[in-house]
Image (cartoon, rainbow, N blue to C red):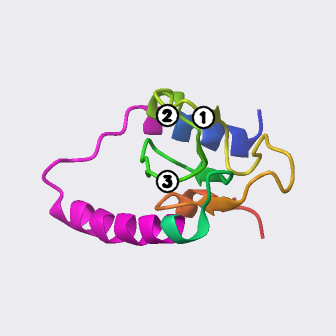
Amino acid sequence: MNDYQKIEDEARKNYSNYKINEEDSWHHEVEKVIRKRVLKVLNKYTTDDSIILNAGSGGEDYPCKGKLIHLDIAEANIKQFPYYLVASTTSIPLDNNSIDIIICVGSVINYTDAQKR
C-alpha cells in the first residue's frame, strides 16, 4: 500500500465518524451563504436532464432539477441518497463528459497530494 492510499484510508475512517458541532455558529453561518449561492447556480444552470456531481458531498444535499450524484469516500455519509458513488475525487468512476455540473463545497482542500511537487 502506498503512502497516498494510507492517507486516503485514514481520511475515510475519519470522515465516516465526523459530526458537525451544533454549537459552531461560524460553520452554520458560512454554510448558509454557500448554500444560497450553490442553489442559485443550480437553479440557473440545470434542467431536468442535467447530471450533477456533488464531489466530496459529505451528505450535503441540494434540491435541484436533474440527477444529483453524491460522491464521497465515506459511504456512511451518502448511502441514504438514491444516486451515490463511494470513491475519491482523484479517481472518479464515471465516463469523461458524463457530468454537466460539478459541485465541490468545502472538501476541495482534501484533494491534493502534499508530497507531490
Q: Position of residue 2 (x, y in %)?
A: 77, 39
Pick the quarter of the image with the N terminus.
top right
Q: Which mark is residue 78?
A: 2
Nearer the observer, 59 or 89: 59
Nearer the observer, 5 or 66: 66
Whether tag 2 and tag 1 are in contact, CB under 8 A, the answer is yes
Question: What amino acid does circle 3 point to?
Answer: Cys
In the image: residue 56, left or right of residue 111 = left
For mark 3, what is the residue?
64
Task: Write down the region rendered in magenta.
Answer: 13-42
Furthest toward the front, the residue is 48
For mark 1, what is the residue?
84
Q: Earlier in the sequence, mark 1 or mark 3?
A: 3
Q: Position of residue 46 (x, y in %)?
A: 60, 62
**79 over 34 or under it: above or below:** above
Q: Residues within 10 Å of mark 1 (few under 14, many from 20)?
A: some
SS at mark 2 in the image: loop
Q: Earlier in the sequence, mark 2 or mark 1?
A: 2
Q: Which residue is rendered at x = 31% and y = 63% of the image?
A: 31
Marks 2/3: CA distance? 17 Å
Q: Which residue is rendered at x = 60% and y = 34% of the image?
A: 84
**28 over 54 or under it: above or below:** below
Question: What amino acid does circle 1 point to?
Answer: Tyr
